[in-house]
Image (cartoon, helix red, strand yellow):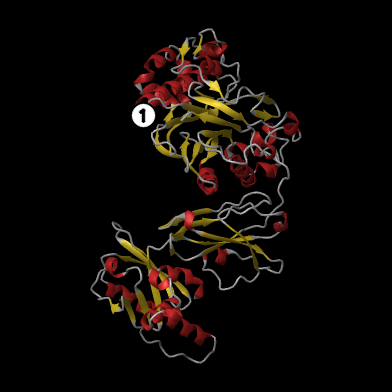
Amino acid sequence: MFNHLSAALALLPRRLLSSSPRTLPGARRRLLLLLLRMEPAAVRCLPGEPKLTISFRLDGSHRHMLRDQDEPLGTLLTRISHNFVKGRGKAKKCKKNKGQPPVEAPEPAVVKLFYDGDEVAHTVPNSEAWRDGAVLQVGDVKYSVQRNAPALITAELPGSLLAGFPVCPRLEVEFGNLQDCEFIWFKEEASNTNTDTSSEATGEVPGQEVGWTEIGCGRVHVPSNQDIGYRLKLRCTPRDGGRSGSPKELVSVGAVEAGPGVCTFDNRHAYTVKEAEWPSVRVVSYNILADIYAQTELSKNVLYPYCAPYALQLDYRQNLIKKELAGYNADIVCLQEVDKVVFTDSLTPALDAFGLDGVFRVKEKQHEGLATYYRRSKFQLLSRHDIMLSEALTSDPIHSALLEKVSANSALKDKILMRSTALQVSVLEDLNKPGRKVCVANTHLYWHPKGGNVRLVQMGVALKHLSHVINEVAPGAPLVFCGDFNSTPNSGVFQLVSEAVVPQQHPDWSSSGPEESCSMELLSTFPPLLSACSQPAYTNYVGGFHGCLDYIFIQPDSMQVEQMIPLPTHQEVTTYEALPSVAHPSDHIALICDLRWDP
């Protein structure tokens, strides 16, 4: 009963809460003590919805009732009374079957609803009757009604827990604010041998923490080596300012396991301990290797045969990815090869806890795509302008000239139109200086080593679209263009971006053979862009290949590079033969730089 003390107190007027029961006048003192003894009855009732729900515990069983909002209150109270009688009748039958003395048939329960001390008329519709602070009486039991109280509608712990790596629960709260919620973490005691977590994960908070030791608070918890071998438990109380809802407990399915030790990104975190100070902006671009590609037979037996099978598992790699990204303290994060489920269930809950909001663009007919995150204390999202490059080429008139040239070779055109490559475009506004905008682009170009001509056309479409978006939506806004371009520094794509033109003689136009050749001079709609992280020796490092494929392009007349975070050294990478590895989650390496954005 007293487990719901905080929820009951949230319903009381502030003048009651500010005083001790002993100092209150008699009537108010009795009201306070009465409410403290009450169980909660949670009511969810939203305008425009035909139904409302009422949840409470009756005779030790949880009751969840779905009723019409316009139904008279008396009909619902009668139903509660019938449920009370039915529950008592089942208890009587159970005792009779066990050979115990017969129990008299239960009497119908008196069920009433009060508000401000007055009984609510039975003719009042449910939508008006169930008010916050009302009191429901069922027999001798009274309930404090919480209408639209903060509630956790999603609450899950990750399946894999590693010592030294942040545990970020997936949480969704209704009628509340995650930033207001209260979090308490517990560690399983050695004597706690109960492994049945199903009731704990969904039930109410127990009265005492038998078998558990409190080890921390806060939305994110980092287990220590002393936690290895023990399960964790999180108690979360949903809140909205001073209002509280019913707490919920989550118990990890498995115990904390040992981490991999030193990771390839640990040394890089030394450069990013603090957030960049305004007007500087820290940007990250990272292909995190989609699970649908990591778990194929090709990946296991050909691409990454040197990688331990468990290190390719999604839960394990997600631990590394979340720790790596959290340690970079970035303001803008552009990710490629993001599984839809990973974005929703893993990355977004984790990065939200570290102050980042995100948007997702899935590839057509694929299960992975692009994700762009931004620090909500520094930016707000103004608009999105995502496209599929092949679709835009044929449907948007601004690409008509390029489409005409591509159409000269039907084989190449068909190949380009088969690609589901996307361009994610987000226009952000600087909250420190309203009106100051930046256009953030994110893409993952066609992957095939002989697809240079396809990538050139894709980049031509992308640059034209970005120029159009900036001119129409954010005139004068600088461009930050991130991605896995699958293009080395000697490619036509890099030349187009960095020199603003690629000649018709460039070998990439015939990269897939003479039958798909389509020579043309291609011009960029932007002046030459700068690779903010220069041209590192490698951003992709696997058993059979290492080279630079990833870039962060900027406009040098509006942004300057303040700091480039060094990549892992060749020795650090080859310690694990190649990437991905036990201590690195992807076959790519994150690019990180601090950019100065002149105010």
Residue 72, image x, y percentages? 25, 71
Q: Residue at x 45, y 56 (%)?
A: 173
Residue 196, image x, y percentages? 61, 66
Q: Residue at x 54, y 68 (%)?
A: 205
Q: Nearer the viewer, residue 395 or 413?
A: 395
In the figure, 272 relative to 399: above or below?
below
In the figure, 244 relative to 297: above or below?
below
In the figure, 159 relative to 449: above or below?
below
Asked if residue 547 lies left or right of residue 471, the reply is: right
**Residue 420 in sight from this viewpoint:** no
**Amino acid type, mark 1:** Val
At label 1, counting other C-alpha atoms closer than 10 Å, the crowd grade (few under 14, some 14-19, many 20 or more) is some
Q: Nearer the viewer, residue 180 or 536?
A: 180
Q: Quadrant of residue 65?
A: bottom left
Q: Secondary structure at mark 1?
A: helix
Residue 235, image x, y percentages? 55, 63
**Residue 547 in sight from this viewpoint:** yes
Determine which residue is flagged by label 1. Answer: 473
Q: Residue at x 43, y 29 (%)?
A: 388
Asked if residue 154 lies left or right of residue 570, the reply is: left
